[in-house]
Image (spheres, grey):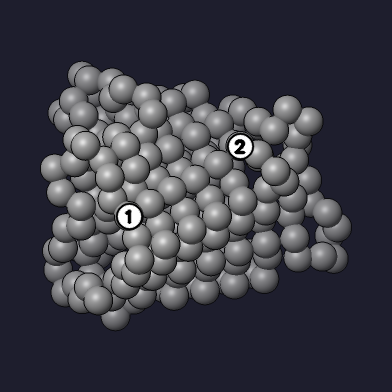
Amino acid sequence: DLHRVDRRQRQMCIRDRTGTITITSRLSFQDQSGKTIYGTSGAKLVSTNQTKDGSGIINIKRCNNIIIRNLIFEGPGAYDTDGWDNAILDDCRNVWIDHCEFRDGVDGNFDIKNKSDFVTVSYTKFHYLKAPKPGGSGGTDDHRFSNLIGSSDGATADAGKLNVTFVRCWWGPGCRERMPRVRYGKIHILNSYFNSSCLLYTSDAADDLLCV
């Protein structure tokens, strides 16, 4: 189960005897501060839903001072239905993602958007093991697009925000685009590895972006 250790404590532990928890309804983690979500050895959150409204594993919104560690987020495979990513940071600040794995997201693996700021992603792997599903309503037959930072060109409130660092991360087999794709913001990618054989591009820049 998803287990809160104690209401007065600031940690949540994801644990299950099998190591795998199947998500039947996307998790909503909102308006939290000073919390850690961590997985015990081999902890995996899995979604098998490829629909527009039912896809995705967790939506993290309006949170501050959050740590997420030692978790595998596994989706059902890429399918362009304008669905959800495995995980989303929406309007969050001071977030550390560490020693996680994001794979086979429907719309993407892990996105950061809507004025989120001061995010570090370290020792984390992004990849796709499942073949993409063609024929989605979005029109892209291969939507293995891993990471998007900034949701749209019109999200001008993101200007001056979206300070994100990727350090010692790995974009592995199956990633085709968005490693990451960025609108606005300042992005550091340090000592990271790209080895997908099917990629069209690694990083892509749009409005008011500074990559270091």
Instruction: Give the quarter of the image for residue 18.
Output: top right
Q: Which residue is at 83% across, 54% downward?
A: 5
Instruction: Give the quarter of the image for residue 130.
Output: top left
Count of numbered badges drawn on the protein: 2
Residue 71: image x %, image y %?
59, 46
Q: In the rendered view, does 4 fall on the left or right side of 178?
A: right
Point out which mark residue 131 bears: none
Q: Which residue is at 34% across, 60% downward?
A: 192
Q: Which residue is the extreme one toward the bottom?
A: 160
Residue 67 lies, with reference to residue 196, above or below; the image says: below
The disc labelled 2 sits on which kind of residue? Lys
> Helix, strand or loop at disc 1?
strand
Mark 2, residue position:
44
Point out which mark residue 193 bears: 1
The disc labelled 1 sits on which kind of residue? Tyr
Residue 85 lies, with reference to residue 150, above or below; the image says: above
Residue 13 lies, with reference to residue 166, above or below; the image says: above
Q: Which residue is at 59% across, 58% downward?
A: 68
Classify 10 Å Cα crowding around label 1: few (below 14), some (14-19), many (20 and above): some
